[in-house]
Image: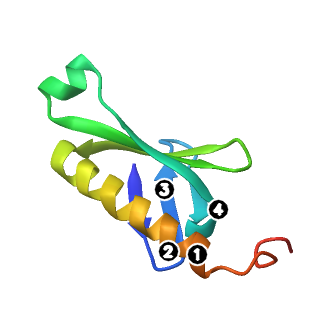
Amino acid sequence: HGLAVTDAVFAARYGLLRRSLALVPHAKVQSVRLTQGPWRRALRLADVHVDTGANKTVTARLRDAEEAAELLRSQAERSRTGRRDAPPDRWMA
């Protein structure tokens, strides 16, 4: 599982035999959440889910718990500023 965050997008790579890349522009993010079950909590791992307005979710899986918490805070801030700075017709093309 790979992860990259730029000024414009949140990108997550996943898949073992067939790699896939999911890109979400910060202005399109509707919500960000962190999940951590009992086994992952014991291993100090967590997942960060980025939900879009298109009813899709991109997940950064198996991150260190502290890294995931920081990613959650920073992505929430990027989403707020991305929506504020993007004109309404920017993503309609």
Name the spot of residue 33 as percent of width and height, x first: 42, 42
Q: What mark, if any, has residue 81 been given in the picture?
A: 2
Callout 1 secondary element: helix
N-term-proximal mark, 4 vs 2: 4
Viewer-side label of 3, 1: 1
Callout 4 secondary element: helix
Q: What mark, if any, has residue 28 been given in the picture?
A: 4
| Left or right of residue 77, residue 63 in this image | left
Q: Which residue is mark 3?
A: 12
N-term-proximal mark, 3 vs 1: 3
Q: Mark 1 near mark 2, Cβ–Cβ under 8 Å?
A: yes
Label 1 – label 4 distance at C-alpha: 11 Å
Name the spot of residue 6 as percent of width and height, x first: 45, 76
For label 4, the crowd category at 10 Å Cα-Cα, with few meaning under 14, some 14 to 19 and many 20 or more, is some
Callout 3 secondary element: strand
| Left or right of residue 47, residue 41 in this image | left
* Residue type at tag 1: Arg
